[in-house]
Amino acid sequence: MNFDEKKQLLIIAAFCGLVFCGEFVVGWGLKSDNDAIDAQLVALDSREAAAEAKIATISEMKEKANVLSNIVRDYTAILPQKDEVLQDAFVDTITDLCRSSGLTILTAVPMKVRVKAPKSRVKDQVVEEKEAFTRHKYRFEMTGEFSQLHRFINSVENHPRFLRVDGIQLFPLGDREDLISASKPTKLLTVEISTYVYDEPKSQMEAIQ
């Protein structure tokens, strides 16, 4: 073998080596791309499976939400409607109960109700969510006897709508001794009565639907 033939063989070997290296580099790059694509496909499959699992629970969640909504509606059926807690309407209701019990109403004053925020809320945090239950409270000043007051309390507790006696104070109409005097049974009474109005939140139900 002469020098020219050896040179040609070296050139051919070098060319084949370059081709092999090029194919190796290209193959390695394709393998890396395929691995990345496979990882993305696995992630997409996982997300698809999670989404399908959530979709499968939507009907069950709707059913549970409807059941809970019906339960709340049954429990809140005894609460007054908004128009029933307006001052004139509420006073008329209590006046009828007083009249049937023998008591006489002198004054009726609405009271401010303190709303306690849950402990988890930060003081400076602005709370946009509306409370479902709104409390209404009135102070009534009336006159009557103990037996009439007892009948009145029973009528409040047995009223078709939810009414609660929050406090009672007794005062004499004259001297202090009149408070315990049997000869003067009529007393000055201060009675605080409250109730609640329920506003069904719709945002959560709409989100589920």
Image (cartoon, rainbow, N blue to C red):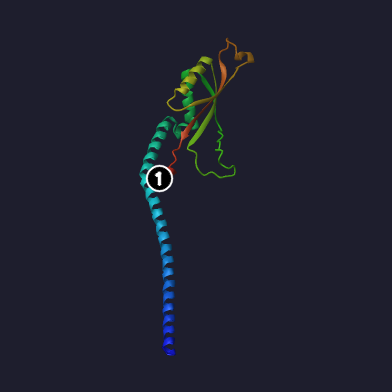
Horizontal side of residue 112 vs 64, given as left or right: right
Choose top left, top right, bottom left or bottom right for residue 84. top left
Residue 136 position within the rendered picture, expressed as x and y whole percent measured from the top left:
51, 32
Q: Tell me if I can see residue 175 in this picture.
A: no
Against 53, is 89 above or below?
above
Which corner quadrant holds the C terminus? top left
> At x 48% / y 17%, what residue is drawn?
151
Choose top left, top right, bottom left or bottom right for residue 180. top right
Residue position for label 1: 208
Horizontal side of residue 85 vs 170, given as left or right: left
94 vs 126, nearest the viewer: 126
Against 124, is 37 above or below?
below
In the displayed orientation, state which residue is furthest to the top: 183
Against 64, is 168 above or below?
above
Residue 113 position within the rendered picture, expressed as x and y whole percent measured from the top left:
55, 33
Q: Which amino acid does the dot numbered 1 rest on? A: Ile
134 vs 9, nearest the viewer: 9
Q: Tell me if I can see residue 64 in this picture.
A: yes
Residue 162 position within the rendered picture, expressed as x and y whole percent measured from the top left:
46, 28
Helix, strand or loop status at disc 1? helix
Which corner quadrant holds the N terminus? bottom left
Tally the marks: 1
Residue 80 position within the rendered picture, expressed as x and y whole percent measured from the top left:
45, 31
In the displayed orientation, state which residue is furthest to the front: 1
The 10 Å Cα crowd at callout 1, few under 14, some 14 to 19, many 20 or more, is: few
> At x 44% / y 33%, what residue is drawn?
81
Against 153, is 16 above or below?
below
120 vs 27, nearest the viewer: 27
> At x 38% / y 53%, what residue is drawn?
48
87 vs 207, nearest the viewer: 207
